[in-house]
Amino acid sequence: MNRGDRANGADAARAVEPGSGRGRPGAAAQTSLTTLLNLVRTGAATTRQELERQSELGRAVVTDRLATLIRLGLVEEGELGQAIGGRAPRHVRFRTGAGTILAATIGHSSLAVGISDLSGRLLAEHHEAVDLAAGPDPVIERLSSLFTWMREEHGTETGVWGVGLAAPGPVHKPDDDRLFAPVLSAFQNWDGFPFVEALAQRTGAPVWVRSGVQTMTMGEFRSGSGIGVEDMIFVKLGRSIGAGVISEGRLHRGAQGAAGLIGYTAIDGESLEGIAGSEAIAREARQAAESGRSPYLAGVLARSGEVTVTDAGHGAQLGDGFCIELLARAGRAVGEALAPLANLLNPSLIVLGGSVAQTGDILLAAVREAVYRQSHPLVTRDLRIVRSQMSGSAGLVGAAQVVVEALFEPKFLQGWIALGSPREHPETRDFLTRAAEAVKRQPQRPRPPGQVVA
């Protein structure tokens, strides 16, 4: 928010309670502004009449609060609706372009960035390889450059309201109910290098961090196969294996933020990752190529010098017996790990994502067979098990959605709505101050990352 925006926001705040003489609205006014904005933002009410009915606020209050929201640049009036026995109502729309959200996902060997509007709709994305062993400084520099390029390329001049970051490991939850952890020391094994704080300082915006599988879960829930679903499980099948859980429309993070570490589940005395992880599958595939057990993979190895999980998938689709059995065994193991979760959580949808899930229908069929065979009939009666169609976009979409939910969570929203931007929220200012102090104290020789805290 620039100086002019802040001035306009202050004028609007004073207009919330005419004649009060106060520069800030009272708690009741903030609550009503929050209620109306979220009704408009979510599409639950789009006309003044609907807002009066849904909010149970009087006409005069709704009119006054809408005028404030319009002056703050958060909503705008649109086209006329259909007239029903009187004057046609004019629709009210949330201004999704009032601010910008930046998103990033950091994997063990890849980096992706995206930019979205305030609805969480991804406007653009970019993916590339990354070498985490080079340390955090190059990653921060690259992220900053890509974010700047994204904003310039897509002509967005609005301020960055928040940054969503997906990390390659579990993300610890704060022990208290504050929005930001007291000390956001970032990636473990980078010697406490303040990665999150450095990113916040570069963007001038608060940063919300979740694990990669949790942001993928949110992306699939909001924009993928999970649209319209309240209870679902997302499973990432890649180098590591993890699950994300949506229960009654909310992401379940667990007591420490580590919910979903199913890769450690023992199947026949071996971990699930040791059977169905991409590295495990690729290792078995290479051994089969070298020994001649798979003619198809032997040919791949001779041509390219390596064998990947994707090659095993191609071999299975072409009828190679070893590849078919390899992926079927991996699928059965995944299904055996998921069946107890299905019985416990009773989801209506299970989505499989990641490189292993993209190998084809043989693995998917094996997962379905194991889950349906080992779960209660009532649990599987309407259960769908599908493969994700979002590919690498799921994590970016989910990271943006995490920021959207945090920005417009009623308690946090009440702290900034009269100011026109979450960057003016006292907690945000405090966070950015602490981030600047942490960056000054950063270590000199960081090492590659593992887990994060946020």
Image (tube, helix red, strand yellow):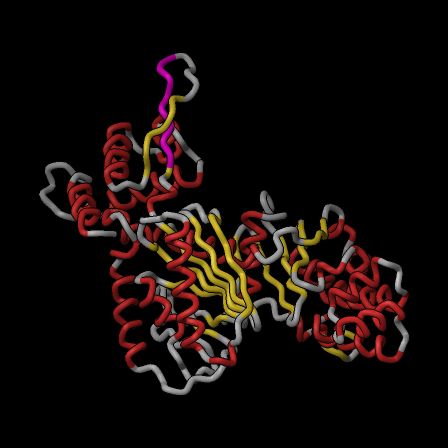
**Residue 91 in the image: above or below residue 121:** above
Q: Quadrant of the C terminus?
A: bottom left
Percent x, y for residue 436? 28, 73
Side (left or right) of 138 relative to 52? right
On screen, residue 297 versus residue 190, left or right, reads: right
* Residue sitting farthest toward the top: 85
Residue located at (36% from left, 40% from top) = 95
Q: Is residue 92 magenta?
A: yes
Considering every residue shown, the one lying at the far front of the view is: 303
Point out the stretch of residues depicted in magenta.
86-93
Q: Quadrant of residue 341?
A: bottom right
Residue drawn 18% across the image and 44% down it:
8
Q: Along the line of sight, which residue is nearer the eye, 339 or 363?
A: 363
Q: Toward which corner of the image does residue 246 lie, by quadrant?
A: bottom right
Residue 292 drawn above or below residue 372: below
Image position of 53 with respect to 119: above or below: above
Residue 142 x %, y % = 43, 68
Q: Is residue 315 left or right of residue 379?
A: right
Residue located at (11% from left, 41% from top):
20
Looking at the image, is 78 positioned above or below residue 365?
above
